[in-house]
Each structure stands twice: as structure tokens, then as C-alpha cells.
Image (spheres, helix red, strand yellow):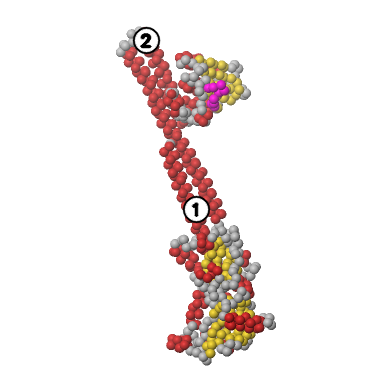
Amino acid sequence: MRRFRLIFVVFSLALLALVALLVERTLRSLAIERQMRHQTVAERIFDEMERGLSRLLEREEQRPFERYAVDAEPSTFPFVIGYFQADPDGSIHTVAAPGANPEAAADIQRIVGAYWRTGRGATAAHGSAAAQGPGTTIQIGTGTQPATAAAGLLQDEPAAKDVSAFAALRSLNKAVRERQEREQVAQYLSADEKLELARPAAPARIAPPAPQEKVLDAARSDAERVPLTGRVIDGNHLVLSRTVVQAGQAYRQGLLVDIQQLAAWLREQGVGSPAAALAGYAAVSFATPFSSAPAAPSGAATFLYQHRFAEPFADLAARLVLRPLPGIGSATYVYALCALLLATAVLGLAALYRMVSVVVSFAERRGNFVAAVSHELKTPLTAIRMYGEMLRDGMVPSDAKRNEYYRHITVESERLSRLINNVLEFSRLEKGTREMALVVGSVAPVVQEVAELLRPHVQAQGFELHAEVAADLLPVRFERDALMQVLWNLVDNAVKYARDTSPKRIELGCRQHGGDVRVTVRDHGPGVPARYLGKIFEPFYRGESELTRRSKGTGLGLALVRGLVERMGAQVSGGNAAGGGFAVDITFRAVEN
């Protein structure tokens, strides 16, 4: 049993470790999945902003040289304040965007003029965006984790996972890449060629591609135009400008953008209107070298991302606070399933332990029973053989001795017969083949008969048997032989375990108890420890090992008593009696006449 307990503990710990590992990997995979999905949403939000800026650049780069600072076409971009052109002689021409306030042109003149004269403006991205490449998005932390831990969550996983899942989704964000490719091509085209590419082609005619030599010559011509560049010049304004070389003279053309209105417009491009579904989960703030984004809410389960816009908006950074999106797996379900799994495992292990321990314990007791029965059989057989051989060989000279030996042979034979009968009776009870010849009547005559039969045996062991049988007992249903065997086993058990106690007295009683009849056998021995009381009627159980060593027996007597009593429809119970000793009560239910 000790070995089984050790194996069971090791198995339970191993199972618990596997469950803990499974839960840990599940939670980690769930966290990675949640981060990947939120990261994808963040990338798409920022990509929509970049697409909007690309439309702005595409429109403004197609604006002809002669149209700057002359008139302004109606614009779909509400954040454009107006346009300007700086001539080679230093003069600045401005024009306000349609719908701007009357002072807009003067404001453009003042702001742009101050910028060109001083050359002051932003030189680097602000804060953590300074080390971030243009056109990239990074996770800067969560509401419950430091930035380093949150940003490294995906980096701790093998690269293959990111390539197969997250990188595939990121490949859909193409706005920055398309803009970079377009700017690389634009470096080799002249102004006229750019305008030609911007015009829609005639339906019936496809122009052949320009030779490579013509493209390279255009790059070296005096009419060269470079892509727009951007610079945040103060906390409220951003300048987009380009240099155009015309007839050997350099002109600086561009437009002035209101950063606050640009931020509102970008927020709508990425998240949608305030009534949009995504707006309830995403909050976007912007930062420039002259201002920083608001701090993320502390203690909230949010995902934080930072995006530095591609050129020419590299001075502008956006921070996205993304609340957990619905429909994405939650750790609550994992914890609930984990609790259910642990509860099921504990119940299963407990049931397994109970079943195996009962089987092992029963097997151990059965083994002890076999050893005890072998000993109990060997003892009377040895005595019978010894006395028989002495009588056979004429070694007993007197008649008194021969009568004593005959008596010993008879007593040991009876003992051997009772032991065999007990084993056979218990076997029939276990198999359910024990038939009961029940009769209805008073048990008083049977109890008195058993007392008379057992008194000589009890007295020979130094005990006094006191029988007290009440008169006029109610009739009950019982079997005479079964009741005699039950009482014989109980009295023999009392003699066996109360041998070294005082007084050496065994009480056999039969009385009416309410509407029932109760038969009691009590000794004045040491009793039974409380922790063993619930097991004394189990087969092959004998209590403490010390008691087992001091007392003879097979551990079958009380189990046989319970089996016979229950087959008669009665009940049996045992317990320590007040004043010392152990008492067994057999209760018969009275039968109405």
C-alpha cells in the first residue's frame, strides 16, 4: 500500500505538471493571438492614415509649376491653409485655400517668411519616435505591462510563427511602400513627364514607354523637380515644400498645413467618425517635436502602439490606445476550463485512489486472512495429531489421561469445524447462495440455549457468562442456526480480546427495545479505538497490528455476523460501552401477529 501511495503521488504530480504546462502554453498562445490581432488592427488604422496622406501628396505633386501662389483649386483636404512660392529674389507669394478666413494669406506670408528667414523648425522626431524609422509601427506597451515586456512578446516567439501569421497580415498594409516606390520613380522624371503620367491615357492610343536614356537625361535637365519634403515649423503648422529648377533658377513651392485639423482628419481616416464601431475601442493622439502625445491610461487592459509617418510627414507621430476588441479569446474561458479540468482530474484521481486503495487493502486483508486461516487450521490439527499418536502408541498409562486427551481431541475438532463452517458460510454469503429458513417466533429460547452451550467453554477460559433474557418478547423473523452461529462468534470474539482484562465477565442479554427486540453481547475488555469502529465489520479486518499479534483469529467473525444478521432482515452495530468494554447489538424488527 505504501508503494502504491508513492506511485500515486508521483503520477498526480506529473499530471498536475502537464496540466500546468498546457495551461501556460494556452495562455501564452492566447496572449500572442490577441496581440497579433490587435497589432493587425493597429497597422490597418495607420495604413488608412498613410493612404490619405498619399492622396494629398499625389494631388499636390501633380500641381503645375505656374499654378502655385496664383490660385487655389477647391480642396477636399480641410487642413490645407494655403499655398506659397518663394522666388529666387526672396519674395514670397501666397494664396489662401478656398473657404479660409481673410487673414489666411497674411498668416501664410508671416509664418513661412519667418521660417525661411530663420531656418528654424523641427530637426528630429519627438521622444521615442526619434529612434523609430519613418513609416513604421511599434508596440510601446500595454496598460498592464511595461513597454519592454509588451514589445518583446512577439519577439520571444520563433520567427516562423510571425512569418506565417502576423507578417502575412502586415503585407496588406501597402500605402507606405507604394509611396516610397512612387518617390523613387519620380527622381528620374522631368516636370513635363510627371504631368504626362498624371493625365489619363487616350482610350484608343497607348503611348510607348520612354527609353532609359531619355529618363536619365530628364534627371539632369534644368527643369528638374524633386518630391515634396515636410517640416513641422511650430506646434500648429507643418510645411510641405518642393524645389523646382526653371531656366536655371530655383523656386521653392509648397503649402501650409494646420496640424490640429490634419490630426482630426487622420483620426477620421483611420478610425472613422465618432459614431463608428471602431471609435469606441480606439483612441488616437498625435505628437510633434513641439508637443507630446497624452499619456496612456494606467491600470487599463489596453494595447499601445506608436506610428511614425513616412516622409514627408516623418516629424509627425501618432499613438493608438486600443482597448480589447470583442470576439477575441479571453483568458477567462481558459481559467474556467482549467478549473473544470482540475476539478475533473481531482475527482477522477480521488475515485481512482479510492477504488485502488480499497482493492489493495482488501487484497492485503485477504492475504492476512489466508495466513491466519492456515495458522488456525494448523494449530488444532497439530494437537489432534499429537494426542492421537500418543493414544495410538500406548503412551498414556492412565484412564484419566486418556479421557483428557480424548476431550482435547474433541475440543480441537469442534474448533476446527467452527473455523471451516465460518469460511464456508462466508463464501456462500459472498456468492449469495446462502439460503435462510426463516421462522417467526421468540428468540429467547435460542439465546438461552446458546448460553448453556457456551458456559462451559467460557468458564474453561476463566470467564463468567451472565445471561439475562426477558420474558414475553415480541415475535421476530430469524433462523435458528444462523442466530446460534452469530452468538457463538460474538462470545468467542469477546473471550479472545478480553483475555487479559478484569473483570472477566461476558454479558449476553435479550430484551425488548421499543417495537424491536435487541440481543446484546458485551465484554469488559479494552474496547476498539474510535478510528477503527467503522471498519470492524469489514471482511478480514482485525484492527491494530499489535492486537492482531496478541490475539488469534482470522478477521472473519464480525463480517460473518453482519452478513448473517442482514440476511435475516435485522441490523447489527458495535461500539465501546459506557464503563469499558465492547458491545455488539443485534436488532430484530418485531412481526405483527
Tell me which residue sits at (60%, 64%) in the image: 295
Q: Does the magenta stretch include residue 493?
A: no
Query: Label 2, label 1: how many angstroms apart (C-alpha)?
Result: 82 Å
Q: Mark 2 points at which residue?
A: 401
Is residue 413 shown above or below 244? Answer: above
Q: Name the residue under label 1.
A: 23
Tell me which residue sits at (58%, 22%) in the image: 517
The stretch of residues the image draws in magenta is: 573-581
Is residue 301 shown above or below 108? Answer: above
Q: Where is residue 557 in the image (x, y as percent from the top left)?
A: 47, 25
Label 2 vs 1, first from the N-terminus: 1
Name the side, left or right, on which 161 lies relative to 275: left
Q: Which image quarter: residue 118?
A: bottom right
Of the residues shown, which amino acid type is indicated by label 1? Val
Q: Which image quarter: residue 583?
A: top right
The C terminus lies in quadrant: top right
User: Between 118 and 469, which is closer to the camera in this rendering?
Assistant: 118
How many numbered discs? 2
Q: Under tag 2, what secondary structure?
A: helix
